[in-house]
Amino acid sequence: MHRAIPHLVIKPSIPKGLTSEEARARLSEDGPNVLASDQGHGFFRALFDVVREPMLLLLLGAATIYFVLGDAREAVTLLAFVVVVIGITLYQERKTDAAVRALRSLTSPRALVIRDGRELRIVGAEVVRGDLVVLAEGDRVPADGSLLDASSFQVDESLLTGESVPVRKRAAPAETPMDPPGGDDHASVFSGTLVVRGRALAEVRATGGRTEIGKIGATLAETTPEKSRLQTEVDRLVRNVTVVGVGVCLVLVLVFGVSRGQWLAGLLAGITLAMALLPEEFPVVLSVFFALGAYRISKQRVLTRKVAAIEALGAATTLCVDKTGTLTENRMTIAEIWADGELLAIDSTTRELPEKFHTLTEMGILASQQNPFDPMEIAFHALGDRFLRGTEHLHDDWEILREYPLSPELLSISHVFRSPDGTGFLIAAKGSPEAIFDLCHLPQSEIEKLSNVVLDMAARGLRVLAVASAKFDRAPLPEIQHDFDFRFVGLTAMHDPVRAEVPASVADCHRAGIRVVMITGDHIATARSIAGKVGLPTEHIVTGPELESMSDDALAERIQDVHVFARVSPSHKLRLVKALARRGEIVAMTGDGVNDAPALKAAHIGVAMGKRGTDVAREAASLVLTDDDFSAIVAAVRNGRRIFQNLRKAFVYILAIHVPIAGASLLSPLLGLPLLLLPAHVVFLELVIDPACSVAFEAEPEEPDLMTRPPRALHEPLLSWRLLVVALLQGASALAAVLGLYIVGQTRFGSEDAARAWSFSALLAANVALIFTNRSWGRSLIGTLAQKNVPAVAVSLAALAVLAVTLYAAPVRSLFHFASIPAADVLIALGIGAASVLWFEFVKGRLADAGFGGAAKTRP
């Protein structure tokens, strides 16, 4: 991305930056501009972490018992399973880490540098020694350096010094030695510090670990986030199930040992039950869903900085969005100009600009930056290039002597130039019509006349700026703009077209029960015009001054039927967030400036602009829009709902499938039957369960009514009592079928191993059926099969293929303690196993209507 340095004049003596080749060489020599944090774990560290997992420890314990019992073949089989589980776990972790690293690369701070004589926005990690870095208010300094040029520049160095008061900076020659952090009027800036005022150009002296913050070992690249509500809920669920499971396992060991006198066999049965009960999938699934979910959202041009945002997205009830650049294209063109009582409309058919409008265009350009980034200033230059190129009204070689910046008290900006004859100064000003009227000290009658013109323009959805000029013949220049004798020149009206996809996205929000609120600093008439174009109600509009006059209680009451706020400043956003929150709304708020940070932080979902947002806004936000497009927010909400919905399905599946596994492990010995499941069987089932619940369900497409249901309550539990009951009923029906077949099989086949093979086939079929019946709670099984989900199909086919191998390949069959059974009996077992859970197909439609698996029809 290329843009000009905002409000900063580069002196000719300042070098034009490194060449691309020099930058690449220094990056290769010094390494990336990152600190030593977040280097990741090596293979052996990751391997050690995996081996410490409770499931693997139980497997190793079972293998040890088999060795003690003299069954080396069984022990080796379990150890082989250990290797397979380790491999799958490491692969899964690498996939998750890759997604996280990709996101971190996208969300890393950017820096605006000058290379090859042009400005270039690059990743902060690519900044090298010698780079010229452009710094502006709200930026994080990407590396240590010296200031070559500065204007009203102040930096917050509290990160290094602990002093909260910003320090003043000044420019110095390039060879000036680096100063220590802290103290005013130094020329050094330091990595990680925050620009709070002004603009500057700095030459990078040190990067990465050679910066001041790198030397003291500070870590800014990553902070340890607090656990989200879902993570806390899952941790509590895992802890409770583990405590109960350990108690049940101990009881089983005691019963087995006391009643049969076989303590080692009892311990083996206890380990098998512990493996069946251990809810190890819950935290893994949550991590995978969040990591892959955030990566999927990033593909829709939305970067996730905080995990809690993914949870909140599905519960968002109000989207508060800026107009400019979010609802519109942020691409201004001058549509109308007014001077000396005459209005001229400008479009693609306009061939020339009448003489009376030349001065208006000239002063508008002079009041803009020479290499502008602001869309309105670009529009002035575009108008001049189109109609005045080659005339005396364009002054590319003029240098701004002084700038009077925009301020909350006076919404105008003035540039001072040396007069062409060298005897005085020429001043060009532009700003809001009210501010320019004030600067020109116009009589009330003239103000009323011009205000009517402004209102007419604004009513057509145009953004109106006024232009003035002045002359000043003595030095020094005054401190404020009001001391100049300004002459009113004219009005310009600009148009920022609405993004083509926004009206449809707003309609999607309305259908989803999400209220869209537009916030703009524009005139009320302009706000009403844009709101009407995107589909927002315009019956009630509140302005910034009206908002200031309201108490918090009055605002909370008034805000319920307002969709448009005009003439609003960033400081008002925080009040709006709090007022909406008081009404129980879950608020997403967009922002891009330093002053937006408090509102972004206070909102349930802070959304920073990626293109035009400051680093401060991005750090305070939960999400970052890479292209500032409103439709991307709606897509993120859709994805957030899908993630939560699929996560809920995965948890129901996990609970349901563990019921027959744990029940078979517990009831078969208590009923005096041989063990139905051995550790090898449980591990095999876990190899099906793990990818099914983490990958297959995560990849499931959204439900057809996902964006027609109202938002769910933010504190709605992941697993309600209704869901728990359904999961237990699914699992209990599968358990009944499996245990029934095992009991019948003892007589039917007269063989323990044959009965085990028969019932295990049914259990695996029930597992596959649970995957497919829980994939969708809004579609029938046939409709679900029509939806593409490659991981779900792959896992199911692989499980059935391996089952066939265990039943009919003699060496493998003996390892699983199976006996050969006729193919017809296998088909019977598969049919019974699948049928045991497919009853859910006949009731899930009614459960979905009652809010099963999604948001309730009405919010509590």
Image (cartoon, grey):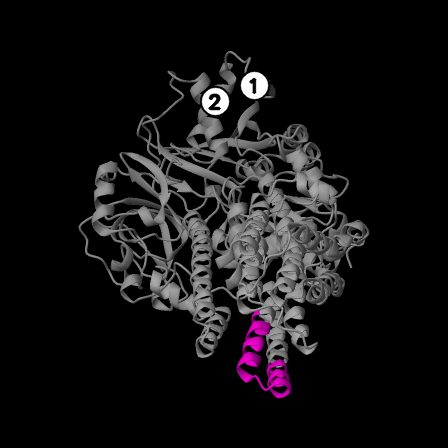
* Image spot of residue 186 (x, y percent): 27, 57
Left or right: 11 as drawn, with respect to 561: left
Q: Pointer 1: what residue?
A: 346
| Total tally of numbered discs in the picture | 2
550 inside magenta stretch:
no
- Quadrant of the rendered structure where residue 453 is? top right
Q: Amino acid at mark 1?
A: Ile
As drawn, which residue projects farthest toward the front? 750
Q: Position of residue 354 (x, y in %)?
A: 51, 14
Mark 2 — residue? 383
Q: Left or right: 279 with respect to 659?
A: left
User: Which image quarter holds the N terminus?
Assistant: top left
Residue at horizontal 58%, vertical 70%? 278
Q: Image height check: is 825 above or below 659? A: above
Nearer-the-camera pick, 461 or 330: 330
Q: Point out residue 375 in the picture as x, y percentages from the top left corner.
A: 49, 33
CA gap, disc 2 and disc 1: 9 Å
* Residue nearest the viewer, comparing 536 with 541: 536
The magenta stretch is 250-275
- Element at badge 1? loop
Nearest to the observer: residue 432 or residue 297: 297
